[in-house]
Image: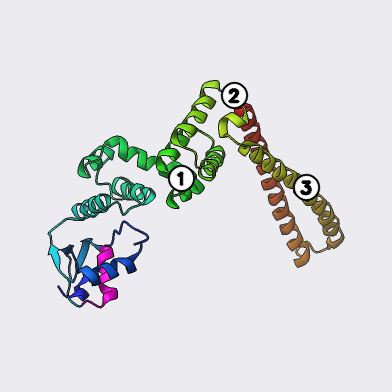
Amino acid sequence: MDIRLVKTPKNNLRDDLGDVESLAMSIRQQGLLQPLVVRPQEDHFEIVAGCRRFEALKSLGWKKIPCIVAELSDEEAYVASLTENLQRETLDPVEEALAYKKYIGEFGWGGETALATRISKSQEYVSQRLNLLKLPQDVIDLIRMKRLKPSVARELYAIDDPSLQSAVGRDAAEKKLTVAEVKGLVSDAISKGATSRRTVTGSSVLEELMEKGKRELSIAKKSILALRVALVKLDSLIEEARPEDENDTLYSLLLVERQELHRILDDVINWKVGKTRELAKIQATYG
């Protein structure tokens, strides 16, 4: 098939195609061992399986490429692409989870059980992968960077507090803790209800969280004071600028800015109240 007629899929599963250069070198030396799978569209053929091979062949300057043409619906093409990537283990766990989420949520082709049947996985496996997306973003990033195994990250589900999930996740990645180590620590924390910081994390992570929170609260208090002082000074200037004509431009502008200053002050006060409650909850739960 003329390579110009072949296009990448609209529902591509992978953000990063990996080391295409090495694949191109392998094809140059050994030839293309497996053709691409494509499906016909209005004016081109869409790749179902073989995006990395396609990019490698383009880089090698191939004009014609061997393809298997299959008549597939959008769902069938998506499942076929997903199945091939799973068999080749080319998707990282987060890419895999995002692909499942698209199938179930964005495209609405079926639930977890239906998807599991289509890709020959258990419903529990699909559910566990999807749960990775519920973890804090910094933990998800650790998984994508292969610094934290999904099996280890899965133990974090038992922790309700996202901040603590992040802290334990970072600690597990840095110390290369095993599933058993993380599971034991979290299980012990849950069974005791209130545990020492050492028991929950195996390190001083909670102390760091508390210290960070206290620093932020200190800054918030100083900010509140500064804003209140600014309001007093602004009120004095507004009084000084008060004209006989209430429609005076400067006077009206200062009144508007005073309202904005009040809004900022309220926001900082509300943040301080929320942070205080958050720290109190952590302290009460984990000792």
Tell me where residue 64 appears, x and y as whole percent: 17, 75
Q: Amino acid at mark 1?
A: Leu
The answer to whether residue 118 is left or right of residue 15 is left
Quadrant of the snapshot with the C terminus? top right
Q: Which residue is mark 3?
A: 222
Q: Is residue 96 visible?
A: yes
What residue range appears in magenta? Answer: 51-62
Q: Is residue 55 visible?
A: no
Nearest to the eye among marks 3 and 2: give it.
2
Q: Which residue is mark 2?
A: 194
The answer to whether residue 200 is left or right of residue 262 is left
Q: Amino acid at mark 2?
A: Ala
Q: Which mark is residue 161?
A: none
Q: Which residue is mark 1?
A: 148
Label 1–label 2 contact, CB within 8 A:
no
* Distance CA(mark 3)–CA(mark 1): 38 Å
* Distance CA(mark 3)–CA(mark 2): 32 Å
